[in-house]
Image: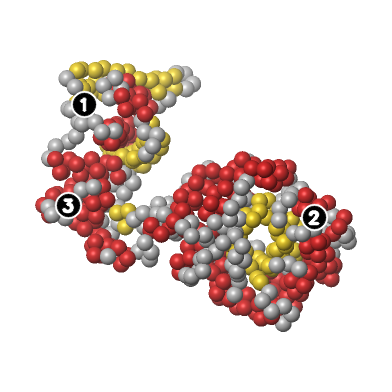
Amino acid sequence: MTEVSRTDDSFHVFDTTLRDGAQREGINLTVADKLAIARHLDEFGVGFIEGGWPGANPRDTEFFARASAELDLRHARLVAFGATRRAGGKAAEDPQLAALVASGAPVVTLVAKAHDRHVELALRTTLDENLEMVRDSVEFLRAQGRRVFIDCEHFFDGYRANREYALAVVRTAHQAGADVVVLCDTNGGMLPAGVREIVADVLAHCESYRPGARLGIHAQDDTGCAVANTLAAVDAGATHVQCTANGYGERVGNANLFPVVGALEIKYDRRVLPAGRLAEMTRISHAIAEIVNLAPSTHQPYVGYSAFAHKAGLHASAIKVDPDLYQHIDPERVGNTMRMLVSDMAGRASIELKGKELGYDLSTDRDLAGRVVAKVKEQENLGYTYESADASFELLLRDEVSGSRDRFYTLESWRTISEQGPNSFTGNEATVKLWAKGERRIATGEGNGPVNALDQALRIALEGIYPPLARFELVDYKVRILEGQHGTGSKTRVLIESTDGTSTWSTVGVADNVVAASWLALEDAYTYGLIRAGLEPTA
């Protein structure tokens, strides 16, 4: 396989997260956000980064002004987005085209109408004038030294309504000097077979006037087929794919950059990234998710936390023999990891693999593995779940290995008080009584809820004895009422995620009320964190 460099132009991975992806509901990028995402995309190795529409809004104009001074792109070329000139005007006098040139971007993508009804109803001009708008705009930008791509908006719908006119738009753009004409499934209604057929037909038409003329694909995901449609276009001969990180985009989103690149690199055996960049895929995906302030999709292909997670005992038994039996690739190729989930579906093989993942070899002690399996199923029957509570499972495993519970203190009692005033709660207070290192300690804490107050009281009681507790922080808290017949008396499961600033861990507690369940999850969180800090249990 040949390696892709910045000068290799045989295939384009074109990212439009900063423009099309930013149209997703709930995403509102600052200029600093866009610069940070651009750095990650360049580090990943995409060929083109579409930064926005300079001149259309102040934020995008500022982005291009700052990008020239602050971005040192090593792999990608920056792209400015805009539209063809206005109907009845001249490209050389069009202020929007002037803004594209002023942006300093070496590449410009112009959106053009390829659907006859859109030309007549949206642009309110003639079909011939639309073709002239394409020709004039491309020639003007080419004369300014810019490389030009044309996005044919609503192309597939336009092709089906008026094939000859849609082809005329493609032909006009190529003949005016556009390097790539991108066929856009703007409404996201296409399916792979139709995409493959139409792209092949358009390419055959292109051969009649410019052998080797290039086509691209821009797919929206309204049918859930954006990635499949993108790959279908590649199968038909497209050499330019437009995607967004994590599939962000308007409505349900765009073709997801990471599954598209993963398929091209791994399934198609086509190198579209610089050497070594594929292994950064999971990290880059999660980093961009953090910037846009959306939780990373746990079930996203290739990069999701659950993409290589195995739960069924049958799967685990096979994976012990050969991980490839239930995985389509080695997760390390994309920077991810295999995970074994511990649940009531787990068998001995699942427990052995999970133990090995945590540093315990259970393969030589069948009795121990059997006891752990039995304990897990017993606990899950009570409402516990260890799929998302690895720390609690490791403590359970340590208990079975040692035959006793690791403890840093012995609890005497705890209680919480919530005070209600005439119109609102006035406060929450918790008191904890315990023994640690031979000393009886009583501490009271206040918080914005009973669980927070308990957390504060436990921290006050123990911090003087165990200084690492000062670094612990509760970062996520989830409550679920388990199915039952007792209404508000049903059992409650609490999942807590904690951090010491460098790593995170999750714990679980189940009880008849939310505060008691929270206490159990807190106890596990403190115990696990202190063990991670290298302390030995003393109680």
Q: Quadrant of residue 207?
A: bottom right
| Contact between labelled residues 3 and 2, with CB atoms less than 8 Å apart | no
* Distance from Cα at disc 1 to Cα at disc 3: 29 Å
In this rendering, the count of numbered labels is 3
Q: Which residue is mark 1?
A: 409
**Residue at horizontal 58 percent and vertical 76 percent from the top:** 236
- From the top left corner, tell me how far across and down residue 193 is, in percent: 56, 75
Horizontal side, residue 150 vs residue 458: left or right: right
Which quarter of the image is occupied by the C terminus? top left
**Does 96 appear above or below 516?**
below
Give percent across and percent down for residue 235: 55, 74
Classed neighbour count for the residue bearing mark 2: other residues with Cα under 10 Å, few (<14), some (14–19), many (≥20): many
In the rendered structure, the answer to whether residue 341 lies left or right of residue 427 reads: left
Q: Give the alpha-carbon distance from disc 2 to disc 3, as whole Å.
A: 67 Å
User: For mark 2, what is the residue?
Assistant: 97
Badge 1 amino acid? Tyr
Query: Pointer 3: what residue?
Result: 362
- Label 3, secondary structure: give it: loop
Res 276 seen here: yes
Q: Is residue 486 visible?
A: no
Residue shown at 72% from the left, 61% from the top: 147
Q: Seen in the image, is 319 located left or right of residue 44? A: left
Task: Decide if residue 55 is on the left or right side of residue 360.
Answer: right
